[in-house]
Amino acid sequence: MNGVTAAVARGRRRTSKNGEKTGVLWWAGQIFSWLLLLTVLAVAAVMIVIPRVGGATAYTVLTGSMAPGMAPGSLAVVRPVDPATLRTGDVITYQIRSGEPAVVTHRVVGVGSTLDGELRFTARGDDNGANDPPIRPEQIRGSLWYQLPWLGHINSALSGPQRQWLISAAIIGLLGYSVYMATSALRDRLKRKKTP
């Protein structure tokens, strides 16, 4: 390796006189690894931790009925709600047929009651031209807490056991990375103390 090539190689990943790593590539690697770590933590928080702590459920938007606000593939996080508190304009998730697992997320466009005083809700997708059939309070799973674009694709791709495995792998990976960073920093500090 000639002198110019060696100087360029040293410039990319340098070590200072006291043993600290420096250089553009080293800093780029550090920034990338921290951004990746923070991104994984943020995605895990908004998809899993926050809904679980808040007693909410995450659903994937499968159709364009709520476009453009909630495009297919969005993640809709829904919190349980007292149906009596719902108003026109609220976005709710409800069972299509009472007692069955299939749900839809649409906007409340009308609140009324039967002659017996039982609440009835009318909902419609923002991109739909017709109202949904009347909804009874027991069909309502909750109201929209927050929604995030694209993350529903990840939610749909993973089954319950896969999601648990992914959470465990992410936690182990993050803990391992934290231990590596801590031991690396400690090792560098000890080297600096030993050098005169």
Image (cartoon, grey):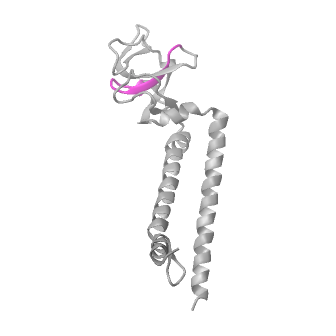
Q: How many marks?
A: 0
- Depth check: give the residue in front, 96 or 173: 173
Residue 57: in sight, yes or no?
no
- Depth check: give the residue in front, 111 or 5: 5
Q: Is residue 93 magenta?
A: yes
For residue 186, side relative to residue 124 (left or right): right
Say which quadrant the C terminus sits in: bottom right
Q: Which residue occupies 44% across, 75% down?
A: 4
Instruction: Please provide percent x and percent y for residue 174.
Output: 60, 55
Q: Which residue occupies 58% across, 16% down?
A: 99
Q: Is residue 154 above or below residue 196?
A: above
Instruction: Please provide percent x and percent y for residue 57.
Output: 53, 33
Q: In terms of image quadrants, where is residue 110?
A: top left
For residue 120, side relative to residue 1 (left or right): left
Q: Give the range drawn in magenta.
A: 84-97
Q: Does the magenta stretch include residue 34?
A: no
Q: In this view, does 2 lie above or below 32?
A: below
For residue 46, side relative to residue 167 (left or right): left
Residue 34: in sight, yes or no?
yes
Instruction: Please provide percent x and percent y for residue 47.
Output: 52, 40
* Residue reaching furthest to the bottom: 196
* Residue reaching furthest to the front: 2
